[in-house]
Image (spheres, rainbow, N blue to C red):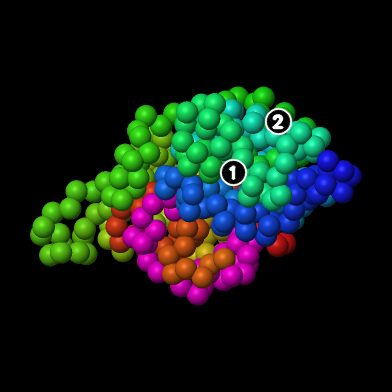
């Protein structure tokens, strides 16, 4: 590999803009197993580059965190292992992460070739699939996450983060069983249409531990979660009422943003106010919320009309200051 090619490999891994990573993911998403398609996209949104780069560039990260009103575990280098547990592919996380590190080193040294981020991600997934007999489509999503995490942290911090306590998930169900549960846990009765107002739905907020709470039809997601009387503040101080972090309940604070792993059509259509708040908070970029039922929502603005499976981000704040 000549100097120009080596610099290109370095640039792609450690200097590509966030838009380039989303383009690579968009080109791969149809090849990712359905169990991790939404989860991979959600991870990319949960950990935007501007969050990591704002903290890296700051001479006083504590002050920057205060200015951005950051709460929770907002440093990826301290939360990397935990951040991937909602992906089914997290069961192969360490093998994937090490393979990505090895590939990145070899790519820079000219021992591996890849013309794009997409090709590099697929190449690692294919090679690991051959070694482990795990299907490429199951490995592709978690591999895309590992590459983007490496872009965030750089090789040294990425390697150090892998030495933290292992927090991989231990899903006992098959991918097909997980997908089936996301389509609905509540048993439907033929007379349900007569009791639309009082109909109850199931919201799953932690798939691995099978944690759920009920929601009355058309109830706000955050309000339904608040009915859970268990004290969750020891695990997350933001959880003052139920498992979903809340503060204002009117869309202003952004505490209650969530990712929707399954059943996004069972939440009310996103209104302009919710869309604008997500953009103002900096959780999404303009143009990324064109869907009527996207996979990022504010729980205080989304009403429940059917069973839904969500994942809760470990942090919140105002990324655009």
In this orientation, does residue 194 appear? yes
Q: Nearer the viewer, residue 317 or 210?
A: 210
Image quarter for residue 220?
Answer: bottom left
Drawn side of residue 273 relative to residue 118, left or right: left
Whether the residues at callouts 1 and 2 have beta carbons within 8 Å, the answer is no
Reply yes or no: does residue 50 show up in magenta. no
Drawn side of residue 102 relative to residue 1, left or right: left
| Magenta stretch, residue numbers | 260-287
Reply yes or no: does residue 285 show up in magenta. yes
Closer mark to the observer between disc 1 and disc 2: 1
Q: Nearer the viewer, residue 82 or 22?
A: 22
The location of residue 221, given as percent across then percent down, is 39, 57
Question: Residue lying furthest bottom in this view?
Answer: 272
Who's the residue at 50% across and 75% down the image? Answer: 272
Image quarter for residue 125?
Answer: top right
The residue tagged 2 is 102
The residue tagged 1 is 122
The location of residue 82, given as percent across then percent down, is 57, 35
């Amino acid at each position: 590999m000549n100097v120009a090619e080596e610099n290109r490999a370095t640039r792609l891994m450690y200097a590509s803009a966030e838009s380039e990573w989303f383009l690579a993911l968009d080109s791969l998403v149809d090849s990712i197993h359905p169990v991790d398609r939404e989860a991979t996209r959600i991870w990319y949104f949960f950990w935007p580059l501007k969050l990591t780069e704002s903290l890296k560039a700051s001479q006083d990260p504590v002050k920057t965190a205060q200015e951005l009103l950051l709460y929770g575990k907002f440093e990826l280098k301290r939360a990397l292992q935990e951040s991937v547990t909602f992906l089914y592919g997290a069961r192969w996380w360490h093998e994937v992460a090490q393979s990505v590190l090895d590939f990145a080193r070899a790519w820079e040294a000219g021992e591996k070739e890849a013309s794009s981020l997409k090709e590099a991600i697929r190449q690692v997934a294919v090679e690991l699939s051959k070694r482990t007999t795990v299907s490429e489509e199951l490995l592709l999503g978690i591999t895309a996450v590992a590459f983007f995490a490496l872009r965030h942290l750089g090789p040294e911090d990425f390697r150090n983060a892998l030495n933290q306590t292992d927090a991989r998930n231990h899903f006992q169900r098959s991918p097909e069983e997980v997908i089936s549960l996301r389509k609905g846990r509540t048993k439907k009765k033929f007379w349900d249409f007569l009791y639309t107002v009082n109909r109850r739905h199931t919201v799953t907020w932690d798939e691995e531990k099978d944690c759920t709470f009920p929601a009355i039809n058309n109830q706000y997601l955050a309000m339904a979660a608040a009915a859970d009387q268990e004290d969750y503040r020891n695990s997350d101080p933001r959880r003052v009422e139920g498992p979903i972090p809340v503060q204002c309940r009117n869309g202003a604070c952004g505490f209650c943003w969530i990712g929707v792993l399954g059943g996004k059509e069972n939440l009310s259509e996103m209104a302009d106010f919710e869309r604008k708040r997500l953009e103002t908070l900096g959780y999404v970029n303009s143009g990324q919320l064109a869907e009527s039922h996207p996979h990022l929502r504010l729980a205080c603005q989304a009403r429940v009309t059917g069973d839904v499976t969500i994942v809760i981000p470990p942090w919140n704040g105002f990324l655009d200051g």
